[in-house]
Image (cartoon, rainbow, N blue to C red):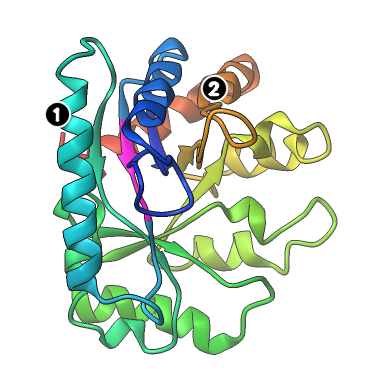
Amino acid sequence: MIDFHSHILPGIDDGSTCVEESIAMLRMEREQGITLVAATPHFYARHDTPEAFLKRRAESERLLRREMEKHPNLPGFFTGAEVAFFRGMSGSDFLPQLTLQGGNHILVEMPPAPWPEEYFRELEDIWKNHGILPVIAHIDRYISSFRTFGLPDRLARMPVLVQANASFFLEKRTAPMAMKLLKADQIQLLGSDCHNLSSRKPNLGDAVKRIEKSASAALIRIGEYERQILGL
């Protein structure tokens, strides 16, 4: 499995604070059977410039890869960004620089739901204007078992993919909905959204074990989405 949402890069956002913590997080990923991790640090257009962000990301990546040479058998990683949604982002010429592994998918962190109609149009225009498919980060942040705002059905009709966090499948009150959406192909990607070794540690392996018991076919489908995104 691939962890499609993490904050393992050291010293770049509110995730890993140092190279040693990043190595320990990758070691936890390996122990859970994860073979590849998406390093997706936060990008906020209102506070940062793409040039400054990419420079910091490149330096953080360099430090981590250099340290990984001392620790064989860790999962590999590829870079992207968790881009905070902003009005007018579909017209921004820098979006291709923030895609997952330089491809045509971009991880987007949405504001709290419900979303006005203009937000949906903005997401559609990212695809229309750039040929870049938005991946909605942690859908579980915007819905609950009792109030979904119609988001799963609406997103299923749009040119987007949906990522859910492992915790969605691990918490007793949300697991039934998570499984329902997964089986209905309204969740296409999984991630830990890990930030550290304690309160938000890597946990995707535990979620995969839960899913295997009742939705193993969905894991096969997720693998197909992963391979398409990475061009495998």
- What span is in magenta? 37-41
Which residue sits at x=81%, y=50%?
145
Q: Residues within 10 Å of mark 2 (few under 14, many from 20)?
A: many
Which numbered tag is attached to residue 208? 2
Q: Position of residue 188 (x, y in %)?
A: 45, 44
Q: Nearer the viewer, residue 45 or 191?
A: 45
CA separation in Å, label 2 and label 1:
30 Å
> Which of the image's four quarters has the N terminus?
top left
Q: Main secondary structure of the magenta part?
A: strand
Report helix, strand or loop for mark 1.
helix
First-in-chain label (2 vs 1): 1
Tell me if residue 214 is in the magenta stretch.
no
For marks 2 and 1, give the one nearer the viewer. 1
Judge whether residue 96 can be spotted in this image. yes
Which numbered tag is attached to residue 66? 1
Which residue sits at x=42%, y=41%?
17
Tell me if residue 40 is in the magenta stretch.
yes
Q: Residues within 10 Å of mark 1 (few under 14, many from 20)?
A: few
Q: Quadrant of residue 198?
A: top right
Which residue sits at x=50%, y=79%?
120
Which numbered tag is attached to residue 146? none
